[in-house]
Image (spheres, helix red, strand yellow):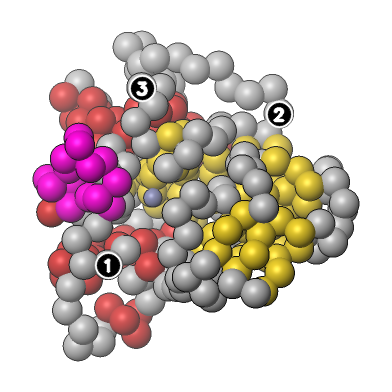
Amino acid sequence: MISAIIHGNEICGAFALDQLLASGFTVDRGRLILVFANTIAFLRFDPSRPYASRFVDEDMNRVWSVDLLEAPQQSVELARAREIRPFAESADYLLDLHSTSLPAPPMLLCGTHVKGLDFAQKMGYPSHIVADAGHAAGVRLRDFAAFGDATSAQIAMLVECGQHFDSNSPAVALNTIFAFLRAADMLDSVPKDVPDLPPPDTQCHIKVTDVVTTQSNRFAFTRNFQCFEKVAKGGTLIALDGTRKIVSPYDDCVLVMPTQQPVQGQTAVRLGRYVVK
Ligand SMILES: [Zn+2]
């Protein structure tokens, strides 16, 4: 299964799936499920407010716990997630296509289990692999049910294809799709008309050790950090969350996707280390 626009304004995945469908693409083996997830949010896209259509009622990538899906709560996103659930449960492999608010190198989020890291390395694309457990605010589709279970063979990847409206992001999404399908042994060769992005010589692997969740409504970084920027010294002040000091927990700490728009209760940044083989 390949899903796009779980976040309605992350349009590169929709472009990529549209191109697949328009070209009549088929896999060599298996059954391919393509999902346009949060179509209601997507259809509200307004170029003058490009960040407003991320969701309608709530973040659709925080609702993927069985308890919440089976609870009486109602929202636009929960209703759609309940429709998608049987397809996700039937998938041996899942790729969820996303993009980032700020410019960042493309990255695979592979979860914390060995099965995810092995599959990400088998894909060999894109250049960065981030192993993290998700968010305090709720469960991602990537971590839903069997995908988040180390003993299950079902595997899920989330890919961040670059910045939302970067014209290169749809090509990254397509190349990731083909790397994914080949790693799943569903595809023998990449179609000829696909923009060919060179595979990275090596993939970097970052293991996330800490997720910083904003507790106050006064969270601010001490300066403008870039994604994958390294803070050399442990104990360096990197943000203030009200009066709470956020410091780098160790030397050579890597900041993963620091947000520019902190929201109370949401992830502000993940902290991790490069893993050297
Ligand atoms: Zn997203």
Looking at the rendered image, the quarter that the C terminus falls into is top right
Q: Nearer the viewer, mark 2 or mark 3?
A: 3
58 or 217, nearer to the observer: 217
Find the distance from the CA under tag 1 to the CA under tag 3.
27 Å
- Residues 54 and 208: in front is 54
Residue that badge 3 annotates: 167
Element assignment for label 2: loop
Q: CA distance from mark 2 to mark 3?
A: 24 Å
Residue 24 falls inside the magenta stretch: no
Point out the tag, 1 or 3, that comes first from the N-terminus.
1
**Nearer the observer, 33 or 79:** 79
Instruction: Report crowding for label 2: few under 14, some 14 to 19, many 20 or more residues within 10 A (C-alpha).
Output: few
Name above or below for residue 249 compared with residue 52: below
* Residue indicated by mark 1: 58
Q: Mark 2 touching mark 1, by CB under 8 A? A: no
Write down the region rendered in magenta: 41-54
Give the amino acid at mark 3: Ser
| Amino acid type, residue under disc 1 in the picture | Glu
Give the amino acid at mark 2.
Thr
Mark 2 or mark 3: which comes first in sequence?
3
Quadrant of the rendered image containing residue 64: bottom left
Which residue is the site of mark 2?
Answer: 202
Q: Is residue 82 left or right of residue 179?
A: left
Q: Quadrant of residue 100?
A: top left
- Farthest residue to the bottom: give it: 72
